[in-house]
Amino acid sequence: MRMGEMVRRTGVNERLLRYYETQGLLSPSRLPSGYREYAETDVATVRRIRTLLNAGLSTTVIAQVLPCVRDDGPRLVPTCADLIAQLRDERARIDAAIADLAASRDLLDTVITAKPG
């Protein structure tokens, strides 16, 4: 399928599909005219990419994780032994970012609730 159909099928705009390609997340074939030709499997790959992005992973990490997950209905399951450890590290990074944001919010609350004067 060509770019327009891929956009319709995935809900992802052309710019993002090109970005995923530059990041090594998608590898559509090229027609002799130079147009991208996406396979049916690319639709599922884009869904996986979107799921992993929504989980807070960077495209760099997704490039490493993507070959090691498969669909199991609406969820992704690991297929590589070392993936769980890598995902736990990513979860710890996200937990630390949440803690930092909560501390920032608490400081801001202190300023907001302080009495002027």
Image (spheres, helix red, strand yellow):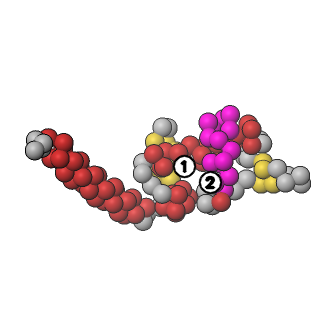
Residue 49 - label: 1
Q: For residue 110: magenta?
A: no
Residue 7 - label: none
Q: For residue 9: magenta?
A: yes
Which one is earlier in the sequence, the residue at label 1 or at label 2?
Answer: 2
Q: Quadrant of the N terminus?
A: top right
Q: Main secondary structure of the magenta part?
A: helix
Q: For numbered disc 1, what is the local secondary structure?
A: helix
- Label 2, on which residue? 20
Residue 32 in percent (x, y) is at 89, 54
Query: In 3D space, how far apart are the residues under numbered discs 1 and 2 (Cα atoms)?
Result: 9 Å
Q: Nearer the viewer, residue 14 or 76?
A: 14
| CB under 8 Å between discs 1 and 2 | yes
Residue 19 in percent (x, y) is at 63, 54
Packing grade of label 2 (10 A; few <14, some 14-19, many >=20) is some
Per the rendered image, the range of residues in magenta is 7-21
